[in-house]
Amino acid sequence: MSTLHITGRGVCARPADRVELRLTVRRVAKTCAAASEDANAAAELLGTRLIERGFDREELKTTAFDISPEYAEETEKGVRRRVQTGYACRISLRFALAFTPEKLSLAAEALFEGAEEVSILFSVEDTEGVRREAVRSAWADAKAQASLFAEASGLKVGVVREVSLDIEGLRTMNFGGAAALSVRAAKIAFTPDDVRSEASVTVEFELV
């Protein structure tokens, strides 16, 4: 019995319809309690700024909370030493929303002032749908190739004996730092690249 091994490849690309803003607020004070209080107040202010721009405050999620000692180097009688100066509290936040350039600019305006480690990540709501479409495209490609080879050899495609699948994670347009901060500056005509997924399926067909 003859068999045929074919690798089909498929791609699915869809326009981004979701955007996620990530940022960290950091406050330093003499005590843990004061640093924590100041950082929480800063996070609450961001929530208020979102409400003022018509967003839902509840969508601003805390993803990390950390307090650590702060140090500075001092020189005394020619000897350098490290001394504790207080505590730093860092709160990492995430805000996700349906993407339009106008909403993105408004959200960045509300959240990025005074923040650090800012970034913007684009995605799609139906991530599983993108992956499934890439797999269907790869399977259709494999079947089309098998039919072509079978026809050229005067045979027909029989049953599938074995299948293996490889699918990549979603490829998206993401950026941070100064590039992310610049979104806050103006209402820009911003169109992110499509969210993409690629899949390959290797199939062993019987030829009859």
Image (spheres, grey):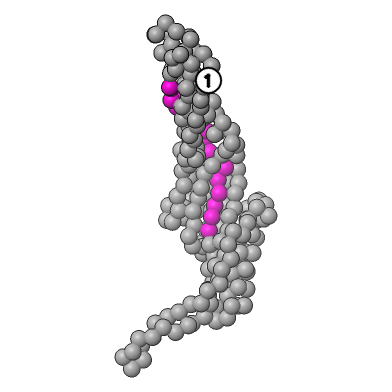
- Magenta segment includes 69: no
Q: Residue 139: horizontal and vertical position, in percent?
A: 51, 24
Q: Residue 27: horizontal and vertical position, in percent?
A: 54, 71
Reply above or below: 49 against 206. below
Q: Residue 20: horizontal and vertical position, in percent?
A: 55, 49
Q: Residue at x 43, y 22 (%)?
A: 6
Evaluate whether residue 93 shows in this view.
yes
Residue labelled with disc 1: 160
Look at the image and give the residue range highlighted in magenta: 5-23
Mark 1: secondary structure? strand
Q: Residue 67: horizontal and vertical position, in percent?
A: 56, 72
Looking at this view, is 82 or 148 the one in front?
Answer: 148
Q: Which amino acid does label 1 sit on?
A: Val
Reply above or below: 8 against 100. above
Reply above or below: 27 against 101. below
Looking at this view, is 14 or 107 the one in front?
Answer: 14
Q: Residues within 10 Å of mark 1 (few under 14, many from 20)?
A: few
- Magenta segment includes 22: yes
Reply above or below: 90 against 47. below
Looking at this view, is 155 or 58 the one in front?
Answer: 155
Q: Residue at x 46, y 30 (%)?
A: 200
Q: Which residue is drawn at 44% across and 17% down?
A: 3
Evaluate whether residue 13 shows in this view.
no
